Amino acid sequence: MHEIILLALTIPIITGLLTLLQRNQAVVSGINFIGSAATSTVLMYIIYVITQQNVVSSQYFYVDHLSAVMLFVVAVLTFTATLFSLSYMEKEVHEGSITLVMLPRYYGLLNLFSFAMISVIVVGNLGLMWVAVEGTTLASALLVAFYFNRDALEAAWKYVMICTVGICLALFGTMILYYAQVSVGAGGPALDWVTLKNMSEKLDPAIMKIAFIFILIGYGTKAGLAPMHTWLPDAHSQAPSPVSGLLSGALLSCALYALVRNTIIVQGAIGPEFAHYMLLALGLLSIAIAIPFVLTQHDVKRLLAYSSVEHMGIITLGLGVGTPLAVYAALLHIVNHAIAKSFLFYLAGIVTQEYKTKSIKQIYGIARVMPLVATMLVIGILAITGTPPFNIFTSKFYIVLAMFENQQWLLGGITLILLTGIFAGMMYYCLKMGFGSEPNEKHRFRMSFTTMTAMALSLIVIVTAGLYLPPVVNSVLVQAAEIVVGG
Amino acid sequence: MDLLTILLLTAAVLLTRVSNLRLGINIVIAQSSIVAIACVIIGIQTGQVHMYIAALLTVIIKVGLISYALYRVLPYLQAEREIVKPNFSTFTAILAIILVHGLISKALPSFAAASTLPAAISLSFIGLLLIMTRNQALMQIIGLITMENGLYLMGLSITQGLPLIIELGIFFDVLVAVVVLVILTYRLKLSLATTDTGLLKKLKG
């Protein structure tokens, strides 16, 4: 089993290296299509094994149901992002935004990014997890700066600086955690998650509290929680659209995953209340902060980026409520959000490429030019704002339901009001872009086959997951929630 | 050990007064060398082989490769200078050192005797201060390295260092971070003709 995890890590590296050696565009595309399909297949196989035998662990790796949920996100998103990249980047080359020489570099970095995200999820050691999370920042930094124009450089600079400083605080927290482990005096591998979890009751509560604050701020920065979210809209809006989808859907989720793993240990040491209150506060703040920016937005990709801040807030709220139902819903929301948001970023990519602008003011009448894209956009926005019958409605509903069940009336009420604000903003801009008179001199847009496949795959999940959740998915989520709640 | 701590903090305080980029790089290299020497001394005191490896890694990566990367980009930045308010920065840095020492000796008396922990935390603070108050891209990178040196020293002082594999990963990450930032600095110079990050405030709202 150990080998299969290693395989999942080596495929992206090999694909990336092979890509860098190629000059021919068709060959590069082919290699990456096969590479991403292989990676996703292996990841799906790991998930399958988890459903059979619950835990796979070795000296450095540890994969359980919680990891399986995240692996699913990364598996789907790397595949759709690569598929979507094929024709998107081809068009960028065609239009002269980038040169053909830059294309292998793009795919090389994309594979490195996938590698870093997979390693965050499969390592079983909190120290190595930190290394991997920092690795995701570095792998994606040059993707954010990919166009190397003024705005992209600004975004990348802020991204690396804010996230590295943030993640340094997480390292600080991890070191304090290690100190807590050492001072107990028990043996066992350093910072190993299972070891720490088994001995969590013995860890010094005062030290663990300090450690948790630093870890929360550190990984919270990376997960885009307010008020440390300032890098997020810049990075998401300046990166190439497939990368924006990956950043928003997979990267933020990976950072949250690292936070959750640490929180489980902290809960064992100091009880759940302290961690829960902190998570609730950050979650609520993230939703509230996103509203004014969503309501007065002028850039379509920034609109989606602020919506990501909001959704990370919702997930954090779910984790903060902390009942099994809430955690279950939060994990489901991670999956739903990842797929719906990457879908929307891909659509935004198509639209910005066709209209050659990201400004919402200059985008109108998509329904006339690209009826299919407009339909998908409306479905996507309806889904992301939590309208039934789409997938995000289910998870949002469960999170709010859990709040009311847990007697947190005020919290539930405030959350609902805030979500209404987001809904208003998103729908307003969606309708404005989707409808209206036909812009001049626009020819009809033809979606390529690979793009179509990527979009259809996401769309199927968005529509069906709202109506029907397969029992196997359900059981994985339930068991993952059990791991988070503890016990 | 005490002498090294004093040297380290002096270097950090000096860094707050620097406006010449080359001088800044030299000071940060000196700082990393002191950290390496500290590793060797702890190694002699405790007899752990681990510490010698850590010292070696510090020399190779922080003194060697990172300074090589910084020196590579330096020729492109001839005209760049940092405009600093030296007295204010130095005052804040010294204030940070005093406050940290005071807090640590009050909250964790067992550590105050060692004097390394407060020094390490103040070093991180000064690094953070540099990142926040400096506009030159290269000075921010120097701040980041200072902050990381502080964190590393903290790890040494409270836990005798993390396991080697994690430490290797951290070193590698720092190296890649500096290389990525140096690439971005170079590109900034190419497209903006300056590396003053104070100009980077177009993306808003």
Image (cartoon, coloured by chain):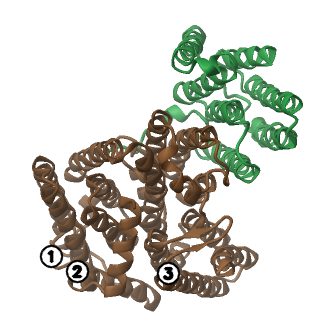
Chain colours: A brown, B green
Q: Quadrant of residue A34?
A: bottom right
Q: Chain of mark 2?
A: A
Label 2 – label 3 distance at C-alpha: 22 Å
Label 2, label 1: how far apart the Cα atoms are? 7 Å
Q: Secondary structure at mark 1?
A: loop
Report the amino acid beneath label 2.
Gly
Foreground: disc 1 or disc 3: 3
- The type of residue carrying mark 3 is Ile
The disc at residue A466 is 2
What chain is tagged by disc 1?
A
Q: Secondary structure at mark 3?
A: helix
- Residue A267 x/y as whole percent: 40, 49
Mark 3 belongs to chain: A
Q: Where does residue A397 sit, x and y in percent of width and height?
A: 17, 67
Which part of the image, by quadrant, shows the N terminus of chain A?
Answer: bottom right
Q: Nearer the viewer, residue A295 or B100?
A: B100
Residue type at tag 1? Pro
Is label 2 in a helix, a strand or a loop? Answer: helix
Q: Which residue is mark 1?
A: A388
Up/down of B71 relative to A420, above or below? above
For the point 31% across and 59% down, the residue is A315
Image check: A201 left or right of A405? right
**Do pointers 2 and 1 mark residues of a single chain?**
yes
The residue carrying mark 3 is A47
User: Is residue A234 visible in the rendered structure shown here?
Assistant: no
Give the crowd class for mark 1: few <14, some 14-19, many >=20 residues within 10 Å: some
Task: Spot the residue most to the bottom.
Answer: A449
What residue is at 61 percent from the left and 43 percent from the top? A178
